[in-house]
Amino acid sequence: CYAFAGYALDPDEALVITHRPPPCRFWNLVVWNPFMATEAVTDARTSINNGAAVPNADGSVTVVVARDRLAHPNAVSTCDHAEGALALRWFLAEHVPTQPDVELVRAKDTPTTPT
């Protein structure tokens, strides 16, 4: 199962994305440019997966996407790109995932820990 979205972020904005992964072999969220490639020319973190993500207490997972990597343990960076694409993928999911919740917030107001 795949979920795709475009983003357009000002330097002081972030997306807070919360999803409830279904039982699956693997899931990840990745930041892409228009050519479906990451912009990580350095060691920037531009994706997160089920092996690295810290879940919330209820089993959901919150990921923070911003132009710079923020303090949340599941934060990813757009490498300062203002626009691009997000892909959220669940491999061999037992059922279709529910639609993720997405909120646009000021970067300074993002959560810093799982809930």
Image: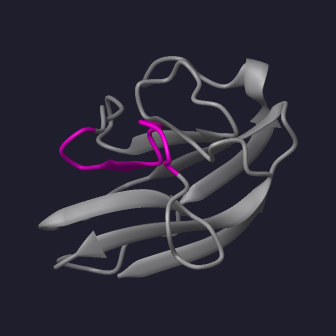
> Residue 20: where, in percent of width, then height?
37, 55
**Front residue of this view, candidates 10 and 18:** 10
Q: Give the residue at x 81% y 48%.
A: 9
**Front residue of this view, candidates 13 and 43:** 43
Q: Give the residue at x 18% y 44%.
A: 51
Q: What stretch is highlighted in magenta?
A: 40-52
In the image, is residue 54 above or below residue 87? Answer: above
**Front residue of this view, candidates 106 and 32:** 32
Most common SS among magenta residues: loop
- Residue 23 seen: no
Residue furthest out toward the front:
41
Q: In which quadrant is the N terminus drawn?
A: bottom left
Left or right of 71? Residue 60 is left
In the image, is residue 28 above or below residue 36? Answer: above
> Residue 45: where, in percent of width, then height?
44, 39
> Residue 29: where, in percent of width, then height?
43, 58
Q: Give the residue at x 49% y 48%.
A: 40
Q: In which quadrant is the C terminus drawn?
A: top left
Residue 100 magenta-drawn? no
